[in-house]
Image (tube, rainbow, N blue to C red):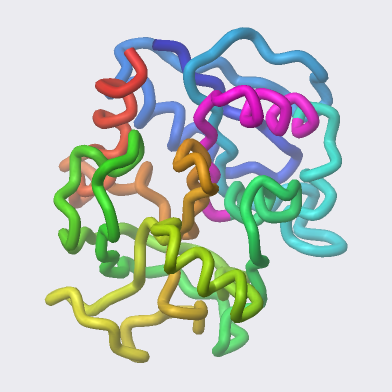
């Protein structure tokens, strides 16, 4: 299996996710610069977290128009899986690969802490190593993680099973106190209709090794290797 991580000016989680990928795959991913216009054949594309282009204009808006994203969109359309984490999620919405938008946190503050997520389905390449309904602990670090979509889009996401993860309490219940940013329907991550594109605000790569204080994120990367190798 070969993965590639897309790099933008302002990316700051690219090395974190590269380390997590290498630990699961057994080989380092390719690191692809935003100005490149070609991508080699890969099995997985990852758009990492950070502050692409300094979050100027709107989070992810400038990155979505970089040369490499045209190729990411093309390859996603051809069925190559794409994972967008935090700023990567924002970029995927701006590029039109995922619906909705990420707005300022409801409290208008940057939030950096561990949160609990409920896995909504496990029949995808990203979640196959979790049980449906499992509660996992994953860190967040964002100021614009408040997922918004119009009511009809939310209805479609819910009805077609495109919600991947929700913010919940440790026992799996929806509670406003467990929603760190005001996201509609407590949404922390969504799939596209093919279930081959996933965007999520929490950072699984930051808890993918017990030495980091937990390994709930590792199951995602291990599952991708099993599915795509």
Out of 57 and 152, give the one closest to the viewer.
152
Spot occupied by residue 173 in the image (x, y as percentages of width and height): 21, 81
The part of the chain drawn in magenta is 69-86
The picture places residue 100, in percent across and down from the top left corner, at 65, 65
Labels in figure, total? 0
Please identify the quadrant where the N terminus is shown. Answer: top left
Classify 56 as above or below 1: below
Q: In the displayed structure, does residue 38 sit left or right of residue 163?
A: right
Residue for point 57% across, 75% down: 146
Give the residue drawn at x 35%, y 47%. 204
Quadrant of res 124: top left
Left or right relative to 9: residue 220: left
**Residue sitting nearer the eye, 151 or 52:** 151
Whether the magenta-drawn stretch holds residue 104 is answered as no
Q: Is 3 rendered above or below residue 122?
A: above
Front residue (pair 191, 171): 191
Can the viewer see residue 102?
yes
In the rendered image, residue 74 lying in the magenta stretch gets the answer yes
Q: Residue at x 48, y 17 (%)?
A: 43
Residue pictured at 28% horizontal, 76% vertical: 168
């Amino acid at each position: 299996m070969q993965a590639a991580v897309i790099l933008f000016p302002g990316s700051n989680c690219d090395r974190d996710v590269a380390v997590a990928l290498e630990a699961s795959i057994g080989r380092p991913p390719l690191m692809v610069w935003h100005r490149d216009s070609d991508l080699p054949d890969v099995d997985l594309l990852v758009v990492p977290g950070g502050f692409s282009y300094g979050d100027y204009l709107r989070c992810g808006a400038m990155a979505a128009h970089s040369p490499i994203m045209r190729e990411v969109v093309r390859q996603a359309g051809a069925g190559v899986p794409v994972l967008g984490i935090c700023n990567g999620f924002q970029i995927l919405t701006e590029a039109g690969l995922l619906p909705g938008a990420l707005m300022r946190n409801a409290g208008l503050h940057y939030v950096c802490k561990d949160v609990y997520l409920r896995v909504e389905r496990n029949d995808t390449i990203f979640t196959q190593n979790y049980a449906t309904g499992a509660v996992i602990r994953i860190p967040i670090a964002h100021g614009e993680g408040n997922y918004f979509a119009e009511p009809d889009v939310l209805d479609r996401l819910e009805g077609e099973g495109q919600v991947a993860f929700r913010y919940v309490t440790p026992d799996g219940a929806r509670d406003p106190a467990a929603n760190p940013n005001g996201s509609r329907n407590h949404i922390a991550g969504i799939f596209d209709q093919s279930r081959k594109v996933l965007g999520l605000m929490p950072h699984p790569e930051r808890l993918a090794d017990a030495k980091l204080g937990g390994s709930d994120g590792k199951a995602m990367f291990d599952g991708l290797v099993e599915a795509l190798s």
